[in-house]
Amino acid sequence: MNSEMFSVGLVQMTCGRDPNSNASRAFDGARKAANRGAQIVCLQELFAYEYFCRVEDSSFFDLAETIPGPLTEEASGLAKKLGIVLVVPVFEKRAAGLYHNSAAVIDATGELVGVYRKMHIPDDPRYFEKYYFTPGDLGYKVFTTQFAKIGVLICWDQWYPEAARLSTLSGAEILVYPTAIGWVPEDSPSVRHEQQEAWRTVQQAHAITNGVYVAAVNRIGHEGSPDDGLDFWGRSFVCDPKGHFLGTGSDSESDIVIANCSRDILEQQRRAWPFLRDRRIDSYAGIGQRYLDRTESLPFKPSE
C-alpha cells in the first residue's frame, strides 16, 4: 500500500440457474475489470446462484460450500494470476446445519486474507434469509490487502450505521457491500424510486460521516416467475468520502464499474470534516441497548 491511489472494480451481472455458468461469467468479469485497471474487484452477493432466498426450500442448502472450497480456490488462482484483490461472496457451509452468507477476501498473492459473515439477516417477503443463514459471529472486520484496507459488509448490513462506523474505527479505507436488492413486481414506480434513492442515500451518508470510500455491487435482472419474482435494479456504484459518485452501473444490464480512489482525498476530507475527532464516546452508553425503555437519563460522566 505504498501508492497514494488504488482502483476498485465492481462486477454487476445477471444470474441464471447454473452455478458454474454464473461463476464463470463473474470471474470473466473480474478479468475484464483487471484489464481496465482495477486492483480490487468485488463480486455481488451470492453471485454464483440465482437469489434462492425468494422461497424456503431445503434443497438449496446443497448449494453451500466450505471456505476454503471450490469457489475460493478458483478465485485464489485468478487473483494471483491477475495480481488483484478479490472479494468473493460465498454461501458458506460451516458445519452440518450451520450456514452463513459470507464473503472471502483474497489478496493479490492468492492468499485467503479472511472471511466476513453477514451480521444483519433480513426476513421480508421474497427475502427469506433467516431460513438459510445464521447471523455472523466474526464481528466487523477490516482486511489489510496489498492495495487497501477493506471493510466488507453485505447487503442488509448497509442500512446500519453502526456497522459502517465500527469498520471505519478498525481502519477501513473503503467499505464494500456485495448486494442483492430489488423490487417486487407489484411495487409502483413511486415506491421503486423511493427505495432506490434511500439505498443510495444511506450509503452516501456512510461515506460522508466516516470519511471513507463506499462501493456497492448489486445484481441486475428479473429472477423468478414474471408475477412472483424480484426485479434487481443494478446501479452498482462507488462514492468518495464527500459522497460524490465516481461511477455508477447500468439499471438494465450487466456492467463493470471502475473507480479510482485517493488516500489524499480521504485524508483531506477527514481534516475538513473531523467527525471521528469530535465523537463524544463518553455519551454513547445506550447504543448497546435494544431500546431505551427507561424514562430517566442514562448515566453520563464526561471524559476528562
Image: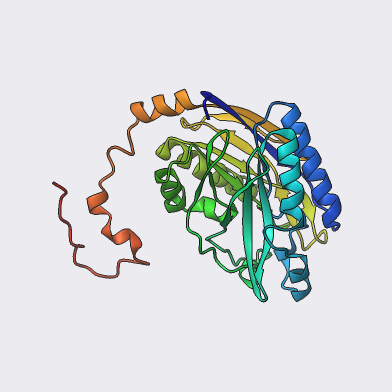
**Residue for point 42% across, 46% down:** 170
Instruction: Tell me if I can see residue 222 in this picture.
Output: yes
Residue 84 horizontal side relative to residue 271, left or right: right
Residue that appears at 45% across and 29% down: 266
Residue 114, image x, y percentages: 58, 51
Whole-percent x, y for residue 145 in the image: 56, 39
Q: 252 or 298, which lies in front?
A: 298
Scheme of colours in the image: rainbow
Given residues 120 and 74, the one toward you in this image is: 74
Task: Reply above or below: 295 against 172.
Answer: below
Q: How many marks?
A: 0
Residue at image position (62%, 57%) is 102
Q: Is residue 187 visible?
A: no
The quadrant in which residue 39 appears is top right
Q: List x then y, in percent, for residue 32.
A: 78, 32
Which residue occupies the foreground of this view, 100 or 66? Answer: 66
- Residue name at image x 58 percent, y 28 percent: 6
Does 230 sit above or below residue 146? below
Residue 274 drawn above or below residue 201: above
Q: Is residue 233 above or below residue 239?
A: below
Residue 159 picture location, percent across and down = 51, 52
In the picture provided, is 66 more to the left or to the right than 156?
Answer: right
Task: Tell me the quarter of the picture where residue 40 sits.
Answer: top right
| 24 displayed left or right of 211 | right
